[in-house]
Image: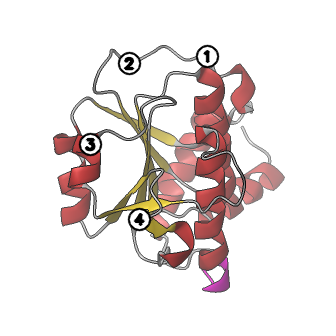
Amino acid sequence: MASEERIKKLRSVLKNRQVDLKVILEDIHDPHNVNAIYRTCEAVGVMDIILLYIKEEFPEFKFNSSGSACKWIDLYKFSNPKDIIPKLKKDGYQVYSLVIDENAKTIYDVDWNKPSVIIVGNEHSGVSNESQNLSTSNIYIPMMGVVESLNVSVATAVTLYEASRQRKISGKYPNNNIDSNWLEEKLNKWIINRDEY
């Protein structure tokens, strides 16, 4: 059984969860990138990560380098963007494809206080055209150097920390919109299944 101190810590973590900020990983296969994204998501309070593998089978990842981050987030699997992106939009989410395109909106021009989803794409081909077309809009990270892009895990981190910065300014840490029943249910699951971590 978890100690009172541990329960207090876990409850505090859950109060900072940004349940209306989600990340979709599309066809990302490098386990180091996936694990780094998990760590960043957990660090800023993202609760849900959607694994979207369109072209290939879902890979088997080992989570040695994620610092157990994957144990504190919820993972969902899809193989068709049409099965998830329209539903998220219908539920009121702005869905942004992170791309290399200076004609797109910058990550600093997005109101991240609104329910938002970030799609990050494959290390070589980026976000698929299909997912981009289904998205609310494309976004990009302005680059000041010769190199045109960041590693996908770094780009995800930069974007999430901009979202986190805006949300912190708006007083969303802790998140007063967290449903208390959801929090207690999630806390109990964490205590039962993960109190060894």
Residue holding disc 4: 104
Q: Where is residue 83 in the image (x, y as percent from the top left)?
A: 18, 42
Structural distance between the alpha carbons of marks 2 and 1: 13 Å
Please report whichever mark, 3 or 4, sits nearer to the chain's N-terminal start. Answer: 4
Q: Read off the magenta span.
A: 168-172
Q: Where is residue 1 in the image (x, y as percent from the top left)?
A: 72, 37
Residue holding disc 1: 62
Residue holding disc 2: 58
Image vertical order of residue 180 relative to residue 135, above or below: below
Is residue 79 found left or right of 144 in the rendered image? left
Name, please, the residue furthest toward the right.
5
Q: What element carries label 4?
A: loop
Structural distance between the alpha carbons of marks 3 and 1: 29 Å
Q: What element carries label 2?
A: loop
Structural distance between the alpha carbons of marks 3 and 4: 14 Å
Structural distance between the alpha carbons of marks 4 and 2: 30 Å
Q: Where is residue 137 in the image (x, y as percent from the top left)?
A: 32, 64
Residue 169, magenta (yes or no): yes
Residue holding disc 3: 129
Q: Which amino acid does label 2 sit on?
A: Phe
- Locate the C terminus by quadrant: top right
Quarter holding residue 32: top right
Q: Nearer the viewer, mark 4 or mark 2?
A: 4
Q: What residue type is labelled 1?
A: Lys
Residue 58, magenta (yes or no): no
Q: Which amino acid does label 4 sit on?
A: Ala
